[in-house]
Amino acid sequence: MNTAASLWSAVVVSGVYHGVNPGMGWPLAVSAALMARKTGDLYKALAALAAGHLLAMAAILFPFSALMVLVQWQREIQTGAALLVIALGVYLLINRRHPRFLARVPPSRLALWSFLAAMAHGAGLMLVPIYLGICGTLETDSGHAAAYDLMWNNATTALAVALAHTGAMILAGGAVAVGVYYWLGLTFLQKSWFNLDVIWALSLILVGLIALITAH
Amino acid sequence: MNLRPDPTFYPTPQMAMQAPVETLAFTLMLSPDGSQPDGLAVVDVDPKSDTYGQIVHSLFMPNKGDEFHHFGWNACSSALSPLTGHAFLERRYLIIPGIRSSRIYVIDVKEPLKAKIHKIIEPEELMAKTGYSRPHTIHCGPEGIYVSTLGGGGADGTDGPPGIFIMDCETFEILGRYEMDRGEQDKHYDFWWNLPRDYMVSSEWGLPPQFENGIVPEDLLSKKYGHKIHFWNLRQRKNVQTIDLGANHQMALEIRPAHDPAKDYGFVGVVVDTTNLQGAIFTWWQKDDGTFEAKKTITIDPQPADADDLPELLKGFGAVPPLVTDIDLSLDDRFLYVACWGQGEMHQYDVSDPMNPKLAGKVEIGGIVKKTPHPNGKDFGYGPQMVEISRDGKRVYWTNSLYSTWDDQFYPGDRGAAMVCADVGENGGLTLNENFWVEFPDGYRSHQIRLEGGDCSTDSFCYPSV
């Protein structure tokens, strides 16, 4: 598998990882459908969760896509992003408290909750080193490309990364939610929920480290 | 922190009902005159055990005069909503407030037979951080542990209104007041909520001078005790509607929402109607437009009595009021238990139709006039008071003390602590279990009961039963 393909699969795999984690919201879709006694509410809730997640990815990736116009600083930007991801991982490893402001978001505002949850846990930031890597593979032969083209390429790539990641996230989370709603029942929630706090923090650090190594 | 959700957290009330049955109960012991330290009794409720019905461990506090009353867990099934962000808490600590001292104990019961004090929050800290005193009801919710209080600041607790404060669910630090807009709420007692629907309901007893030294008959007759229930936007922390049950409905106490969050109704008990001495239950519900309504759905009549059989307080009435002082709802939302502390009766109502409850069972024990003994022949002092139902709904436990100074007015003299258990029939009906009788140490009275792994007045569920 070439570099680009493996980076794209990392985008998708991280999406699946976010999606199946109950902490990122699929149980709320099950709850919404059971509360309203309407199956439609399951999909409405999933759409809200996806919208919030997508927005969180975009909010993090687009500023970096703009930065990448500074081609000559590419390595420094990659290093900086990698260090940022590692720093967040270390912070989450030390500070294991969950942000309390998330508990103030009403259950009716799932998109907002999903956006804030993804931001607070650095779900978007984790994608940055992967995204920058993908941009790197694009630009191997575009050294002379006009700044406009470069920016356009970076922006569309950012959008594609955010969409692919969120798509994978909501398909995976949605599949679990539908499975639980129709067949598995809520015992699955008790059985399948693992405390991933440490693994999550470690995976941030790992992604950052890999990016550091490959950038140099 | 656990690696998996605590096995005693349940997504739905139905799943909690199917869980293993309780083998231990925790019961609060209070020293009515403050001569001994208050304590926590661990009671064996496993019928197969040799020590069934006995206190198998007691933990006494290092202070006197706390007056233990209500208490609750540090974490419950509410943690299973991703919205709270703390799914991996352990149900491990009991939060026990002293209603008289305003001191709060956090007791580690991970090993129930070695229960130990984990943390003590002194009254000065509570006062400094919240301006509230006389902490009472405990519930675990979205932002941590919520505690209602009955008093405001100052020595007699009337400097500012009482309210709810929030504690961190991991460190047990007091974070501060809950309310951002309390509306006309100026008294407090109980509260509970519907988490997915995002509303809270709170009730009113009276201010500390109205209860600490006993019931104040003039205040009761001039209808100065609480008679309103308040509805709150839970996460906005805002009082959105107040319903006045009518000033004659004095002391609106326990709030019991349906456990299944898909249901949008609940109950509240009223101690006494001053026009006719009845006890009452109101059903409250949320309407389609989001506002609330309440309607009286149960009344319990006073029973005529000879003045000679009545305490000073009631002699003039020639009747004994039911005094509805606690109610509790089974996890299937089917049976509502109503303690008639004055008459010595425990009623069981079928509330499958919440607007039309039907009396399904009744037990007589204790009582001001009847003084019915337990089927084992022993005297049951006072009347049925704090009631707790097993998760499966098959056993109902209760104790007999209301509140030290009120006990003495309605039941003069010391009548001893008690804790009994009744079995529930397949389709209702209530029978006292002859073999379950707890002996408490001398000089103590008993108040609220909590069951190992959760019960019918602690856990808030985030998912509807299917």
Image (cartoon, rainbow, N blue to C red):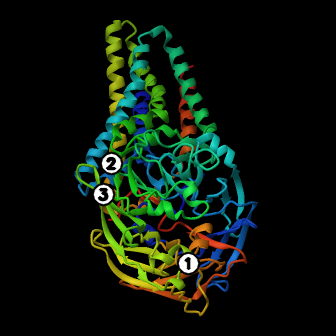
Q: Amino acid at mark 1?
A: Pro
- For residue A59, above or below residue A196: above
Seen in the image, is B76 located left or right of residue A96?
Answer: left
Give the alpha-carbon distance from disc 3 to disc 1, as whole Å: 52 Å
Question: Label 2, on which residue?
Answer: A174
Asked whether the residues under marks 2 and 3 belong to the same chain, the reply is: yes
Element type at marker 3? helix
Provide the residue designation for mark 1: B311
* Local crowd size for mark 1, using a 10 Å CA cut-off: few (<14), some (14–19), many (≥20): some
Please, which chain is the residue tagged with disc 1 on? B
At a point 43% along the width and 62% down the height, the residue shown is: B250
Pick the front one: B455 or A199: B455
Q: Secondary structure at mark 1?
A: loop
Given residues B57 and B316, the one toward you in this image is B316
Few, some or many residues within 10 Å of mark 2 (<14, 14–19, 20+): many
Residue at (58% x, 54% y) in the render: B135
Q: Amino acid at mark 3?
A: Leu
